[in-house]
Amino acid sequence: MPLKLFDTKERTIKPFVPQDPKSVKMYTCGPTVYDYAHIGNFRTFVAEDLLRRTLKHLGYGVFQVMNLTDVDDKTIKGALQENTTLAAFTQRYTDAFFDDLKTLSIDPAEAYPKATDYIPQMVEMIRTLLEKKLAYVSNDGSVYFKLDTFPCYGCLSHLNLEELQLNASERTRMDDYGKEHISDFVLWKRHERDRDGDISWPSPWGEGRPGWHIECSVMAKGLLGNTIDIHAGGVDLIFPHHENEIAQSESANGVLFSKYWFHVEHLLVDHKKMSKSLGNFYTLRTLIEKGFSGKAIRYLLLSVHYRSQLNFTKGSLEASNQALARINDFHQRLLRSQNEATGSESSGDICSKAKIHFDEALQEDLNISEALAALFELIREGNSLLDKKTISPQGVKEILDTLLTFDTVLALLPTAQNSVPEEVLKLHQARQDARGKKDFAQSDALRQKISELGFIVEDGPKGSYVKPKSTH
């Protein structure tokens, strides 16, 4: 069964056929590094990570590019307010972004180009558009794309040009520096000292800086070629950003820009749009400070299909903690049972059934609810076999291998650096010895030491074990 994805441009789920049957070229719009990324941003990045991991799980090689927008009105304003260089200002938030990616177990992309590293190539693409008479230099020295030269404009948002003019976003209106027509968009912004300070670059049309849209077109071309397989981002980027990318890329390069368009729906907080004025604006760091783990936040962001709105609530985070605890407990039980199992029963049937269910769900436009259902069915049936104590050591290994295979896609289990260190294992063994001697005061003291190190002890009829904390 081939992978099928919803293509925004065609508004249908269709088989995924990359240009190279063995490798996928994927461009994902990254952050503007002027502040800490919020959980709405990370909803998109986690969904894109699920797509990337699914592609790799299905046997594709992936070359992913995620850009870093380090020059635009917001980054320049921030640098000027702090009286520092643009590079120093944006590096702080770039470093924070990479830390956040690790917290959420998001696989690194193959390339993270910065817009400021590609300005000569941007000038060259603008030059090409001018030579083709698809762009013009305004009387103030800015350069604009002539939208009426691209008849396919609106193919992604499925709006005609008149509707697009009426629904032009605030960011598009901010680009108005003397253009000939309201629908034209800026490729190069003339330098204005009051707005830009000393931040500018040379061009044949005078000092200035690139427009936001040209940045992605050039970085995609430079690292992936003229035609890419998948272009991904949030639904808020469909218009005008991705529409403008299509127009300028296809006009300059003369070929299709992207074969598939993958867009992730909005995140809401308590059914409302996230807003600082409403007090419901959360960065990842805010939630970590409140005691929630990166894995729990990842589970929540992952658990709703990418084309459905996700309602982020404290209750949903608590539910994610509970689901994550169930997965982790099963993982720990399998690890313990590898050396304890004495039966002869195989687990092949439940593993093969779970794998088929899991893969078919992912292949159907990343149907995450069915993929998670396959995971929890494996947990239910696996626990049942372990309870009966009839499973063989090899059977335990088969289930563990299946769980770990699923986790190459889901990335919910503790990472290696979060596994139980030797120090904690020794404390746990000392506690077990104290309990055996009925020295409960010492047992409680050792449990407290283990807790202070970030781990919890679980005692039950199946024995005692220690695991990393995953709840707040």
Image (tube, grey):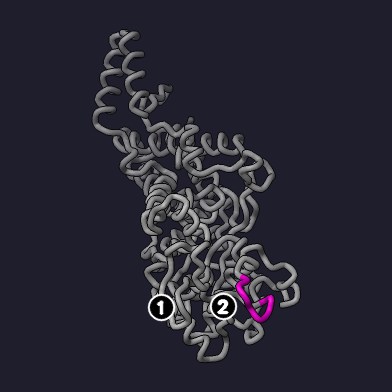
In this rendering, position of residue 244 left or right of residue 416: right
Q: Position of residue 308 (x, y in %)?
A: 64, 55
Whether residue 136 is situated above or below residue 296 in the rendered picture:
below
Q: Position of residue 175 (x, y in %)?
A: 60, 69
Whether residue 279 is situated above or below residue 43 in the rendered picture:
above
Real-space CA distance between mark 2 and mark 1, rounded to the nearest whole angstrom: 22 Å
In this rendering, position of residue 184 left or right of residue 349: right
Tag 2: Cα neighbours inside 10 Å, few (<14), some, or many (≥20)?
some
In this rendering, position of residue 337 left or right of residue 369: left
Nearest the viewer among 281 and 435 is 281
Residue 22 visible in the current orientation: no
Whether residue 187 is situated above or below residue 409 in the rendered picture:
below
Amino acid marked by disc 1: Gln
- Secondary structure mostly taken by the magenta-highlighted segment of the chain: loop
Name which residue lies at 26% across and 19% down.
Answer: 430
Q: Which residue is mark 2?
A: 140
Nearest the viewer among 374 and 4 is 4
Secondary structure at badge 2 equals: loop
Nearest the viewer among 305 and 161 is 161
> What's drawn in magenta, residue-wise?
176-183
Q: Which residue is mark 1?
A: 121
- Callout 2 touching callout 1 (CB < 8 Å): no
Q: Position of residue 302 (x, y in %)?
A: 53, 50
> In the image, which disc is placed on residue 71?
none
Name which residue lies at 40% across and 33% down.
Answer: 389
Quadrant housing residue 397: top left
Amino acid marked by disc 2: Asp
Quadrant housing residue 24: bottom left
Residue 462 visible in the current orientation: yes
Nearest the viewer among 465 and 472 is 472
Q: Earlier in the sequence, mark 2 or mark 1?
A: 1
